[in-house]
Amino acid sequence: MFPIIPANSVTAPSGNDEGIFGFGVDGGYSNVSMSNLVSNAGVVATDTAGVGSARSGSAACSYGGDKGIFGYGYTTGNVSITNLVSNAGVVASDQAATTGTVRRGLAACEYGEDKGIFGFGYTTGYVSITNLVSNAGVVASDQAATTGTGRQYPAACSYGGDKGIFGYGYTPYTAVTNLVSNVGVVSSDVTGVGTARRGASACEYGGDKGIFGFGSNGGYQSVTNLVSNAGVVTSDVTGVGTARAFSAACVYGGDKGIFGYGAGGSIVSMTNLVSNAGVVASDVTGVGTARYQVSACSFN
């Protein structure tokens, strides 16, 4: 097993054509800030020089319908800095620390079609606080803790066109989920379905459904769990691709998804495409710096 710095998760909105992977921990166990763009055909580009503080355990989501945001994570300590992503995939320099609680190992997703939410994570303990992101990319102060189980290393994605879901994580290992309404309200725990694990990734597919994939529960996993357009999580689907954890995922091509990077038997940069029917493809040779604890979102 690799040393656990922070975790990430992922997210993606409906309809965006391109994606971006960013930040993470490289093979030398150093935090990095480079990014890799994903085309509307699911092709990952070589490294783009990093902008913003090198960190791991951040999260990312879309906002404004066509832009994205990376936020929070771990540098030499937990942080709450954010970096906006333009609708051309350009990552901006650090924004001043938000008013939210510094933390790592959280997740994020889009809701309400043009807004986002960061949730859960680890400060000096497991938390369930959330921070909403406006359609202008402004992060709000902490919302009162949800009734959900505080945990780190969850994953999150959109579903139903305008809602979201947080799922899985460590507290210890759990498979519970929490739905996010189209106004950003997080529900109490829903009994978990599928393998309890941490370090999974998630993204939307098919325009209104979602998928959780990969993770670790003492051993690396490649199982996936589909999310219906009503937010119902299915039982495990036998995994395709290299078992690993702390990868990331996002939408591309409007209705498809991609899982990328992570750590399994080694730190990798491989990817696995997700069709608009939620079928995960076998490994695609990796492009860019191999790393884990990355984040991803879609844009444009």
Image: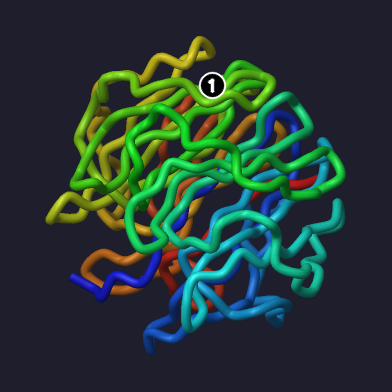
Between 252 and 30, the one nearer to me in the picture = 30
User: How are the residues colored?
Assistant: rainbow
Between 121 and 60, the one nearer to me in the picture = 121
Would you say 54 lies left or right of 132 here?
A: left
For the point 63% across and 77% down, which residue is it? 34
Would you say 4 lies left or right of 52 here?
A: left
Furthest residue in direction top, as rendered: 230
Judged from the image, the secondary structure of the residue bearing numbered disc 1 is strand
| Residue 258 in sight from this viewpoint | no
For the point 36% across and 63% down, which residue is it? 124
State which quarter of the image contains the N terminus: bottom left
Mark 1 closeness class: few <14, some 14–19, many ≥20 residues within 10 Å: many
Between 22 and 147, the one nearer to me in the picture = 147
For the point 12% across and 55% down, which residue is it? 218
In which quarter of the view is residue 125 placed? bottom left
| Residue 244 in sight from this viewpoint | yes
Seen in the picture, residue 267 relative to 139 is either above or below; the reply is: below
State which quarter of the image contains the C terminus: top right
Residue that mark 1 sits on: 209
For the point 24% across and 44% down, which residue is it? 197
Q: Position of residue 46 (x, y in %)?
A: 64, 74
Q: Position of residue 170 (x, y in %)?
A: 26, 48
Q: Position of residue 110 (x, y in %)?
A: 65, 35
Q: How many marks?
A: 1
Furthest residue in direction bottom, as rendered: 28
Would you say 64 lies left or right of 71 here?
A: right
Three-letter residue code for mark 1: Lys
Q: Position of residue 270 (x, y in %)?
A: 43, 62
Seen in the picture, residue 55 relative to 126 is either above or below; the reply is: below
